Each structure stands twice: as C-alpha cells, then as structure tokens.
Image: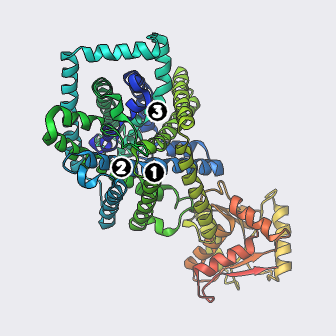
Amino acid sequence: MCLTGVDYFSTLGYQPGIAALAAGALSPMATLILVLLTLFGALPIYKRVAIESPHGEGSIAMLEKLLPWWQGKLFVLALLGFVATDFVITITLSAADATAHLIENPYFKSSLEGKAVPVTLALVAILGAVFLKGFSEAVGIAVVLVIGYLALNAVVVFEGIMRVAAHPHYFVDWQTKLTQFHGGNPLLLLGLSLFYFPKLALGLSGFETGVAVMPLVKGRSTDTERNPAGRIKSTHRLLASAAIIMSVFLISSSLITTLLIPEHAFANATASHPAGEANGRALAYLAHKFFGNGFGTLYDVSTILILWFAGASAMAGLLNIVPRYLPRYGMAPEWTKAVRPLVLVFTGIAFAVTMVFRADVDAQGGAYATGVLVLMTSAAVAVTISARQRKAGRITFLYGFIAFVFAYTTIVNVYERPDGLRIASLFILTIVLISFVSRIWRTLELRVDRVDLDVQALNFVRDAVDRGTHRICLVPNRPEAQDISEYDRQDREARRDHHIAPDECVLFVEVHVPDASEFAGVVKVKGTEVGPYQVLRITGTAVPNAIAALALKIRDLTNERPHIYFNWGERHPALYLVKYLFSGRGDIAPLTREILRRIEPDPEKRPAVHVA
C-alpha cells in the first residue's frame, strides 16, 4: 500500500492548494464529491481490474484483449500516450512541488527564490542518475516515507480541526462566504461543486499503480497462475485501504485549508507579484504557521522526499510499460529493452516539460489530471465492456454510469484546461510515429519465437530425406478449395515452371495469419495429407517470415538446404509493400529471400529461393 501511496498520498503536497485555487470556498464540497467518486467509482472499477488482470497488466491489457487486430494496437498506443503524460508529468510536477516546498522554507527562501527551474531540473537529474546507476523499487523505503509523511499530515490536520473547533467563527465566516457569493441555495452549491470537482481530479491518481504492483502482493498457497484468488483479495484490501486513508485526508485537509488560509495566499505568480505563500503547498503553510519553522522544515523535508520518490515510482512505471508493449508490437527499437537508454530519453523529456512549464505546479495540473482521468475512464469502459460480455446484468449499468461520470470529468477537465490534451496529443503523435517507423524498420526480421512441427509434419520432412531425392522442395500455395484438384494443378504448374523432376518430393506450404498486427509469435506447423499430396499448414504473424522460419527449421533438422519455389506477383510493388505491412502478405518471394539473407549470411547454408 505504501509503494502505491508514494504516488497516491504524495498528492496531498499540492492537492489542497489546487482545490482551493480552483473551487475557492466550495473546495470542501467539491472535494467531498471527489471522495464519493473515489470510493464508489474508482474503487469498484479497479477491484474489477484486479480480478481480470491479476498479474500487473492493468486496464490497458484488458482493452488490448477486448479490441483485437490493428484497432486494438492503435488504441493501446493512444493510451500509452496518456500513460506517458501521466507519468512524465508526475515526475515534473512532483519535482516542481518539491522545489516549491524547498524555496518557500524560511531557511532557504533567500538563497533559492527565483530559481525554481534550475532546482527542479536538478531534482529530475538526480532521479535520472539514480536509475542510471541501477534502481529497484524499495518497499522498505516507501513504507518509511509514507508512514512518516502521513503521520506529519495527521498532526497538521488534527491541529487544524482543533483550531476550527476552538474558534467557531472560522466556520461561520465560511458559511457567510458561501451565502454571500453563491446565494446559499443548497442545489446551486451542489451544482457549482459538480462543476468544480473535475479540476480536483489530481486526487484520483494512484489506482493504476495499485494494480501494477499486484505481482508483489502475497497470495495464498492455493493460488494458481490462472486464479490467484488470495492475491486478488489482498489487492482489494490494498486498494480499499489506500482509498479510505486518502479520502479522510482529502476531506479534512480541504476543510482546514479553506477555513484557515486567506484566499490571497493561494494566488498564482504573475509578472508583478510572486505566488502566494500557500500556492502548491497549503498543508506545509499550515505546518509552519501552527508549529513554527522547526516542525515546518521537518514537514518540508518529508514532503520533498515523498514527492521525489513519487517521481521515482513514475519513472519505474514508464520503464515497465514501454518494454511490455512496444517491443512486442515491433514498434520500438531493440535498445528500448535496456533500462539506461530509456532513462536518458525520459529524463530528457522531463527536462523539456519542466522548462516549458517553468516548473509551475498549477500549470502542470491540467496535463496531469488529463492523463489520470483518461486512464481511469478507459478502465471504466473496459470493465463495462467486460461486464456486458459476461452478461452481468445490473452491474453492467452501474459500471456504465461510472464510466459516464469519468468521461464527463475528463471532458470538463480538457475543456477547462486543454493544455493537458495538447501534451497528451504530442506524446501520442510521437509514440505512433516512432512506433510505425520502428515497425517498418524491423519488418524484415525473422519475427519468430520458435517453430513447432507436429508429428505428421515431422514425418513429411523425414520422408523427404529418406527418399534420397535431389532436394527438399517447398512450394508455397495460397489455399482455395484445398481439394485434390487444386493441389494437382499446383503440382503440375510448379514442376513445369521450375523444372522440378518428377521424382523430387514436393511439400506444399500454406500460411494462415490470424492477426497481422502481432509482430512476433510461435510458428505452428501442421502436416496434412490431401490424396497423394503432402501439405504443411502454418499459423504465423506474417507469410514470408513464417516460410523463412520453416525453411531454416527444416535445414537445422535435416542438414539439407531446402529449396523454396515461388511465382512472381502481378501487382504494383508499392501495393504489395502496404499489404505486407498491414496484413502480413504481399510479394512473398523477395521478402522471404531478404529475411533469409539477413538471418543466414552464408549462401552455402542459406535455404535457396527460386522465382518463376
């Protein structure tokens, strides 16, 4: 829970200040709506995500399974853009808020004031340096940081509540303000709170991290790979505990910061005036005010550490997600499987974002909220679709309603703060562009994990060798009727066009591509007899790659060079290229030969390709 909470609970460092700035006196009511959405919306959604992806894949994997072929891949790439937005902004926003706490501390204010950008860049650089040296998430460190941070927040919140209780005029002044500016009409106040609460969406972060850490959760001895019931139940407790703790802190901190801090202290920086003392650090402001600079500095140190470690959690998330999806799609270079190059890339991106936003916490809030809300909306949609497929009845409508609420929240947030969508769009465009360039660049790789031949297929190959014929002849065939007359015609044409002797063994090869959007996979070969003809039927991700893999496998099994006999295609080469990229088919002959040339540089050992 603390590992999840490094990201989730750290938002207390800036959430109350952002809420007060966005909703003003209505901040506690808007926060209450946010809490209700957390407990009765996000929590049940992610409990279901934990059931359906119990190995840490998260909601993206659910949607990937629900949307096959290219539309699924493109949708996942778009979601990865929002994931990148969420995690990168987590790094930059957390570092910027840590900087705000450092600069506003009375012991450092004189020396660091006006240096927010270089200080934030230094924090991001230290984070990158940690990962370059080698980093694994330390649960023990997370526990110490979170418990210490929550304990200090509890002290501040408790003291704030005691002061409000001891001086009822704070509460009376707040009621007067609501009556004065909003008419005191409960329905109007509720409507305005519903309007403002999307701006507080930062308080919803952390649920994706909660399901991502599932592999670390201890299960039961009876758990199986397919049904880790104990791990799922423990994760449910993890999510519920984190949500309840955060909900208590959100409501109480919003109440005391709204009642005890003057509005001007929340103000953003302008060209002529610096930011208010509570801007981005409302609870830290109260910690200094309540207990003096000694305790306030201790609170600042705790906040800086947990915010910095939240950036570490986000970096670890990025390093986990990119290798999990993009290389499997063939949409990332091989070097993205290595940690250090990715760390340099993400650190560079974080530098750029920090400089663009001038290390301003409030300016980055919209982008962060957009990333969080899109992921939560996609999770709600995935759970709704899954419930409908399971014919879950009324629960489907409940999930659908939650998805609608998240979608509304996302739309309002994007409308109010479109910068988040712009940043996410930039990430999406970059990911899609790089992905397709990489896919095209890597398309002539073998793209095969292994080749499995069934007993019949192995017998066909063995028979071809035992006959002592001049060569093993592989003749690719695009299946039509798959009857004796088809293979009789193909055999006659192949022997005529390629001058194959009557006594030489011909093995027909047919490739079925169930999902051309998959980059690599296991090539399965099934042997079938149709009359006197022997047919090897293959399942793979692309036709030329599967044929090349089969030829290499036969060569390794028999120590003989197979000969593959093709006919030239009749269409334009550019059309064949596009067809190959998107359907796994195309002008098979030159593609197969090029794949073999790249895999086997020695012409004497390379399977021979003939084209007529």
Q: Residue at x 58, y 67 (%)?
A: 447
**Residue at label 3?**
199
Give the CA distance from mark 2 to mark 1. 10 Å
Q: Earlier in the sequence, mark 3 or mark 1?
A: 3
Q: Earlier in the sequence, mark 3 or mark 2?
A: 2
Q: Which residue is mark 1?
A: 357
* Nearer-the-camera pick, 284 or 3: 284
Q: Residue 128 sits in which quadrant?
A: bottom left
- Badge 2 vs badge 1, beta-carbon distance below 8 Å: yes
Residue 130 drawn at (x, y percent): 30, 62
Q: Residue furthest top?
A: 185
Q: Quadrant of the N terminus?
A: top left
SS category of the residue bearing label 2: helix
Relative image position of residue 140 (x, y in whole percent): 21, 49
Q: Amino acid at mark 1?
A: Phe
Crowding around mark 2 (Cα neighbors within 10 Å: few <14, some 14 to 19, many 20+) is: many
Q: Amino acid at mark 2?
A: Ala
Residue 27 position (above or below residue 295): above
The amino acid beneath tag 3 is Lys
Q: Work out whether residue 260 can be spotted.
A: yes
Circle 3 SS class = helix
Q: Is residue 398 above or below residue 305?
A: above
Where disc 1 sits, the SS reads: loop
1 to the left or right of 387: left
* Vertical relation: 268 (above or below) 387: below
Is residue 532 visible in the rendered image? The answer is no
Q: Which mark is residue 554?
A: none
Quadrant (top left, top right, bottom left, bottom right) of the C terminus: bottom right
Q: Residues within 10 Å of mark 1 (few under 14, many from 20)?
A: some
